[in-house]
Amino acid sequence: MSGPVVKAQNLARFYDVKDGFLSPVKTVRALAGIDFELDAGKTLAIVGESGCGKSTLARLITMIEEPTDGTLEIAGENVTPKDWAGLRKSVQIVFQDPYGSLNPRQRIGQILEEPLKINRPELSAAERETRAREMIALVGLREEHYDRYPHMFSGGQRQRISIARALMLDPKVLVLDEPVSALDVSIQSQILNLLVELQDRLGLAYLFISHDLSVVRHFADEVIVMYLGRAVERASKEDLFAAPKHPYSKALLSTTPRADPTAKKDRIKLEGELPSPLDDLPGCAFAPRCWLAKEGCKTQRPELSGTDHRVACFFPL
């Protein structure tokens, strides 16, 4: 197909919450409007602190939750709840905890064949088994692993199984929600290399959610930096890591470990209070913690501007 595999416009998700029985309803703006396009064979990374809206975005893309506002297109089709059943085959997710996402009572063969039983009922048992065994080999496991249980595998092997399950329905998009953060550092590179190999072979589009910027630097093609439900910067990974323009991005990158012991380290320690997601501030949400903020930043909200390197800041670096 031509055009982006995933296209989001002003995608938002709000939640109504109450502090108590008699308290008024308040709104949590978990995702306050985000735009992006994702092409086949490309990786878009979403980074930011906990609570910035990364996982909420993943739930919307995988059609676990319905957006409050905005539009979402997958494979050229507009996504609405009535279309979820048919479109979910195109988008699959790999979770952070490989053991928690696998049924300990099922053998690996059963785990891999279950998506086919639900979504491809026309396939025979023999065809499902053949497909499962082919996928086991594709992710670097051995044929005898088909009859084993999840507890018999290491963390890296379990994540390979999770990846294999996600690929059983031939998706166009994989949402990778912190896929290596629960693994040993020595295993992380193996899983990332596997994902790169699968992307090259199958033409997959990846939405990569991570807080580890050192991984993002070597894995992503493009990066969106989020803060309290909004995108504050979007650029290619080369441009972002070479010259971040938003103060928040600069602060995030300053905490990333560097392999060069002689490199100068200028860590930026953010001060001030983190605004509550219950408060819809009129200005820039980062202003209370920003060392460049002026009075106008507290009353006017900056929007993403620019061409290839976009930033939401009145005083970009």
Image (spheres, helix red, strand yellow):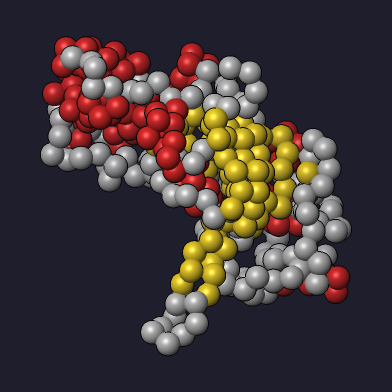
Please give left or right for residue 119 compared with residue 218 in the image: left
- The residue nearer to you, when weighing 15 against 266, is 15
Whether residue 257 is visible to the viewer of this picture, yes or no, is no
Above or below, 31 relative to 76: below
Whether residue 67 is visible to the viewer of this picture, yes or no, is yes
User: Which image quarter is the N terminus in?
Assistant: top right
Q: Residue furthest bottom?
A: 22
Q: Position of residue 64 (x, y in %)?
A: 41, 46
User: Which residue shows up at 85% across the image and 58% down it?
Assistant: 314
User: Which residue shows up at 54% across the image and 70% down it?
Assistant: 27
Answer with the quarter of the image where residue 108 lies.
Answer: top left
Q: Position of residue 25 (x, y in %)?
A: 49, 77
Please give left or right for residue 39 compared with residue 138 in the image: right
Answer with the quarter of the image where residue 98 lies.
Answer: top left
Tell me how many marks there are: 0
Please give left or right for residue 152 compared with residue 244 in the image: left
